[in-house]
Image (cartoon, rainbow, N blue to C red):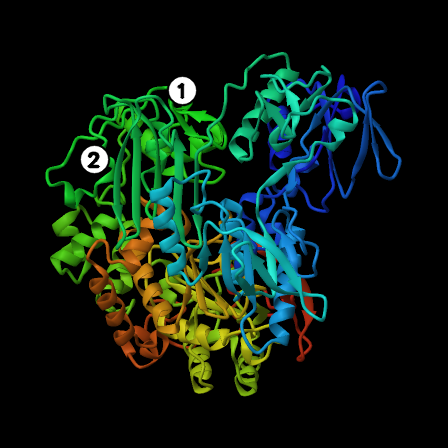
Amino acid sequence: MSNPTQARRHVVVIGAGMVAHKFVETLRAKDESGEYAITVLGEEPLAPYDRVHLTSFFAGATPGDLLLAEPAFWDDPLVTLRTGVKVARIERVEQEVVTNAGERIAYDDLVIATGSSAAVPPIEGRDTTGCFVYRTIDDVEALQDYVRGEAATLDRPVRGAVIGGGLLGLEAGGALKALGADTTVVEFADRLMPLQVDAGGGEDLKRIIEGTGVTVRTSTATARVNAGDDGRVASMDYASGEQDEVDVVVFATGIRPRDELGRDAGLTVGPRGGVVVDSHCRTEDERIHAIGEVACIDGEVWGLVAPGYTMAEITAADLLGEAPDFGGADSSTKLKLMGVDVASFGDAFAATPGAREVVYSDALSGWYRKLVVSEDGHTLLGGVLVGDATAFPSLRAMIGQDVGAPSAFVIPEDERGAKTEINLELPDEAGVCSCNNVSAGQIRAAFAEGATTVDDIKVCTKAGTSCGSCLPLVIKLVEVEQAKAGIEIDRSLCEHMPLSRSQLFNAIKVANLTNFDDVIERFGTGRGCDVCKPTIANILSTLENGHVLSGQQASMQDTNDHALANMQKDGTYSVIPRVPGGEITPAQLLAIGEVATQYGLYTKITGAQRIAMIGARIDQLPAIWQSLLDAGLECGQAYGKSLRAVKSCLGSTWCRFGVRDSVGMAIELETRYKGLRSPHKIKIGVSGCARECAEARGKDVGVIATDNGWNLYVGGNGGFKPVHAQLLAEDLDAEQLVRAIDRYLMFYVSTAERLQRTAPWLQELDGGIEHLYDVVFNDSLGIAADLDAMMTKHVNAYSDEWRDVLEDPAKLAQFTAFVNDETSVDPDLLYIVEREQIRPATPSEKSDGTLELVDAHRRPVRIAGDRIPVGANEMGEK
């Protein structure tokens, strides 16, 4: 990569938001010769972050979680990011920007990406303490601190009001609700989301939002915010003469382009604001571009991310000599507001001459679906979806296409009678990913060039990597192309088993098989291998709850399962006592210390709040287990494909901020799910408040306490590819929470593939989180009772696996150093896996004056297979 000093041109970007980030990302990807060095100047202290998901901040996300790129992105030598820098003016003649500190920064090309600010209507009292806007992380942090401060002084819930019932207003309402406030949303128009949703959809949306406990006032004008004796917000007057008592007010009435820099520099500004640019995003000054919400194209300012991304890509291409035009952008929106799916796309209000509407409304289910089609009833023009937006990605991509019978998309199949053929063949020009402007043709082209999997397509095109709403459609397109290319995705477990793990699970369940021989005879061939044997053992353990070392099970296990402990790199094993909730007695701590001392084990506090003892020989494990059992400790966890641990914070018992007993809940969950065999390991976290000290959103199951109950997150994973868990349900009581986790885990166990963790499983689940919600809470597949029964069977049948070994001579006999020697192990015999592990060892004098080899932790080095006299040196000599 070129050195910045060798770059021929310098482009300065004013603003460090999502659109600015997209511009930098695009220009660096296209500028292969390193022609441009880029300097980004941002007012906020953070690198560019995701404003679209600001509300997740109230569900435990941290500012760092919202960052759009890893820190390494900004290590590019051709990119300089400067945060906390405010630009005071643009000097066009000198081609410089001047900061508030007086620093002058020269540019060859300038990109204005200052975005917009929250528009606050001229309501009397709008500056009263307790009034907020909802735009930046600073805004939401200030709102959060204020509401929590008020809550600490009141003997009732905080009363909050949001002025504005559009996208931002409903997000702000959700934020207040997440903070435990009694919330009212006030909208001047006759319906919520008036720019996206029609009257019918707005009515259904209002009904659903009110069902969550939020009060909605439409056709209501706010006249005044009143302060109390302490100077803080106390009430709010409406133009109708009514009054509401409130403690906090959030203004979410729209945005205003931050065009003051362009205006002061003499650039033309649109009648409603925004720096005027042409179809290439150029201003009247050929060296200055404007992109995102600060730009005005054809008299319009776009307030959505997707058009801003398009402008960023156009500007990057324009700087490199290409000449794409901004021909408009996808203004479709899909989001979940307070747990409610809302989507609009295309000509949602049937403004096209001759347009007709096909509408389905079900007030009981909360569904509203409207498609706008051409006069002949075949060409899709747009639509509105409320309550269930699973069809949004496909429908949005089909705008302008013949959809056959549009009723097939709006009327539920069970009400249509005979199935109606649905045309889903998309032309190349059909848009698939609006966030990254990826068409169906681009995905097909990437496939033809060798990107034959969904992950490949995501890397090559960026489709499905932003908001994720298009991912189901991306998967379908890839599967179609795979079929056309004759690529058969082999989901067989191995050469002996032609079924996938999920297929095999259900086959064994239906056939009611209980041992490996019957399974391989019925569904496979040969004698099995190290792939299918452990998988079948795992499935049988789940379905039958038999001990992992019983009968054929013992010979089918992976090494860790066979030893009920994790093998380490030197051939020894770890013992990690199960400590539900991290709660442990002083006596148990002493017992762990005594065992570690007696057997010379290395000890370490794990990331799951457990104490690991590492370095035990396999023949020592039973004695270690017995000592721990005598102290009341179950002997292990952190091995096998099963529940590892449930991590928790201190919760309301000890923590000043805790609102619920996270430790108690963690103990309940770990006790319930311990020993549950699954396709991969499972980790759970329980946080006692939104500060999220247990890092629950990085777990397969995350539970976060609120004033109203528990929020449940699913499908999060740490490790190699970290994924944040997705919110499945809010404000559950303990019984609802446990039942929901039961069903989620058993649905995952029953349908996931081999070694598939919950994050990729959920990403590939048809219908995604919405479908999972329907399965868990609405019993959409009619299997809720079966999932409940499976978990009940597991809980009732669980038995301490380590105690079972100690009480069964046949199982206990498997824990010997040599299969042909049942005598005690020679204490002078030392083991390691590979001889070269001796090399870093050093001699250490023992109490009897002889020498032994020890590693960096002062532990004896074990030499595999060789009898070496104690006191031998590294070469095995006296």
Nearest the viewer among 100 and 571 is 100
- The number of numbered badges drawn on the structure is 2
Numbered disc in front, either 2 or 1? 2
The residue tagged 1 is 445
Q: Residue at x 37, y 19 (%)?
A: 428
Give x and y (percent) for residue 281.
Answer: 62, 20
Give the secondary structure at mark 2: helix
Classify residue 802 as left or right of residue 316.
Answer: left
Give x and y (percent) for residue 103.
Answer: 87, 34
Q: Quadrant of the C terminus?
A: bottom right
Q: Residue at x 41, y 50 (%)?
A: 759
Q: Quadrant of the N terminus?
A: top right
Give x and y (percent) for residue 732.
Answer: 40, 67
Placement of 276 over or under 580, stated as above or below: above
The residue tagged 2 is 408
- On the image, which quarter does residue 605 sit in? bottom right
Classify residue 244 as left or right of residue 141.
Answer: left
- Of labels 2 and 1, earlier in sequence is 2
Nearest the viewer among 610 and 393 is 393
Give the secondary structure at mark 1: helix
Q: Residues within 10 Å of mark 2 (few under 14, many from 20)?
A: some
Q: Disc 2 residue type?
A: Ala
